[in-house]
Amino acid sequence: MLNLMINGLATGMLIFLLAAGLTLIFGLMDVLNFAHGGLFAWGAYSGVWVYGMTGSFVMAIVGALLTGIILGYVTERFIIQPVYGNHVQQILITLGLMLVLSEMLKVVFGPNQIVASPPDYLSGSWQLGDVVIIKYRAFIILIGVLVFALVHYVLKNTKIGLTVRAGVMNKEMVQALGINIKKVFMLVFMIGSAMAALGGVLLAPYSGVIYAEMGMDFAILAFIVVVIGGMGNFVGSLFAAMLIGLSGAFMTYYVPDLSLAVNMLLMAVVLVVKPQGLFGAKG
Amino acid sequence: MLRQLNKSPVWILVCSAVLIVFPFVNDSRSLMILLTQIFILAIFAMSYDLLLGYTGIVSFGHAMFFGIGAYSTGVLLSRFEPTMLSLLISIAVGMLIASIVSYLVGLLTLRLSNHFYAMLTLALAGLFLVVAEKWRSLTLGNDGFTFRVPDIMRDRLSFYMICLILMVAVFFILLRLTNSPMGKVLVAVRENEARTQSLGFHTIHYKLISSVVAGMIASLSGSLYVLSLRFVNTSVFALDVTLDALLMTILGGVGTLIGPIIGAAIIEVSHHWLSELGKSYAIFERWIIFFGILYILAVMFFPKGIVGSLKEMRWKKRKTKVKTENKNKRMAG
């Protein structure tokens, strides 16, 4: 029981890392980035590659973050900016990018699944009474909480966070006050991509194997989270991610075939009852 | 403008007449099969264009309706005697299920912004794919199953004709629909939903009709598709199917009905050609990349597609002609 809970929380944290970037980007830029899952998968692959080269897990995380930041920059600058303001085109183009990103993975790293394992100091588990806690899962939860606390602190207590929050509310006003909102967009996009890449590299040892299509699978979960949590709502996405993670963990244990269906059902209920999301104020 | 509208059906009639004669002149079997595929996918792409081009709704789960049609036909034909009657029933069942699903999806999300419909359809199509994989007693998962088809469908030539006729029929039905007052409202929704609403139209109502019609036609094309293969597996639910429709519509021209047909032809021919090339050059095995890049470039620089850009060019030419005529008149006067 407790094990399932930890399992669910760990998965939830990974989804949160993906969904948080998505929701921030959407809230600020009005762009729903369908390529976000691709950045997630790139984070996983590049992280595993760096881990294989250097043997250091810390370096792997740094490598994934760098990949996320670079890809985020390139995406924002060359793909999103040209079609800024046109919703249909944005949706279409980011999906195209997703396709290219996941196919590029197959070209660069080969089409087969790649096996990944956690470093020695994180593998194994603790025994507390009759409860077994797998170290790596605890580690993921810890990282997730840290990232959440950091981003939350930055959003609430710094000038840049203030600008971002103001931008979510009213872009034109922020611009009228002499702030270059485009720079803020780019920054947020890069941070969101880095978070997605971080989620990817953390997932790799957790699931054991990585494959090119995993971006899409997790992106779907992240979309569900974003809808449940409310578009553009950072705190809401944490709760929704936990909810999806936990329900996923329990459902895969009791009725494995229905786990995705239950998540969809949750989303459908939220859409009917409160379409702006459980924690959202704006639609 | 009116003349232009009347011209395109004439063109399509001429082209279809050529296509009817074609198999009797040219007896290349593989070319005929390729053309049949193009007709089927053109039906699919046109249904997609009704959503994207005319109503301005982006769906990432159109494969779900395609797959619903495909599986209804496959399952019913394998369970019952493969007669014409059961085939027609299976197509009708597929269209019915597709209309119910599209109605429910639309009801949930169409009153919200575009993003919701795109996300929900993407997620739901993923769900259908998983269900098809898991429900092995019905679908045999990814291995799929073969089934027998009615005798008349076995003959490649008659199947070719049926697909051609259906494509032309769908074209004219959609042409009628989009030129009707309802079609005009759909275009108004695409251009400015808030304003259409303030004019007193129930936009959600119109969007729902559009998505249900698109779902039903997509289901029809799915049924035809598996009839041509006599085999069905979970790949009919894959994201690639939706992406193909997207690419065909965008490349050919959004908001025109001929565009998707031309797009379907281009994509199918290049599919065929690239996978041939893939046998000799390894790089072409990853042809999806080329499609992805082509697709991004098309969205960025060529958003109107082939037909749209041609129309624009003609429009501009006429405009400059009128302008110079006016100038001349003024100078003369």
Image (cartoon, rainbow, N blue to C red):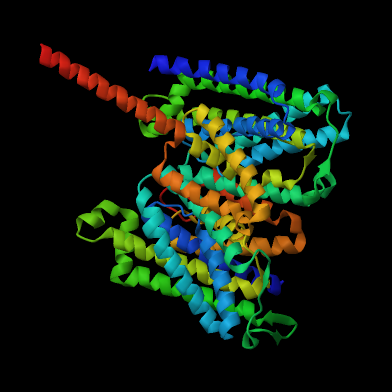
Residue depicted at 82% across the width and 22% down the height? B85
Residue B255 vs A72, above or below: the answer is above
Residue depicted at 47% across the width and 71% down the height? A67
Name of the residue lying farthest toward the bottom: A121
Q: Can residue B167 be seen in this view?
A: yes
Position in image of residue A218 (x %, y %): 59, 60
Name of the residue lying farthest toward the top: B333
Position in image of residue A226 (x %, y %): 51, 56
Name of the residue lying farthest toward the right: B81
> Could you say which quadrant of the image residue B87 lies in?
top right
Looking at the picture, tell me which residue is in the foreground, B179 or B267: B267
| Viewport quadrant of the C terminus of chain B | top left
Q: Is residue A16 visible?
A: no
> What count of labels does the image hold?
0
Position in image of residue A16 (x %, y %): 53, 65
> Could you say which quadrant of the image residue B16 lies in?
top right
> Could you say which quadrant of the image residue B28 lies in?
top right
| Viewport quadrant of the N terminus of chain B | top left
Q: Is residue A96 left or right of residue B24?
A: left
Position in image of residue A76 (x %, y %): 39, 59
Residue depicted at 68% across the width and 35% down the height? B34
Looking at the picture, tell me which residue is in the foreground, A3 or A259: A259
Q: Is residue B96 left or right of residue B112?
A: right
Residue B17 vs A57, above or below: the answer is above
Residue depicted at 43% across the width and 68% down the height? A70
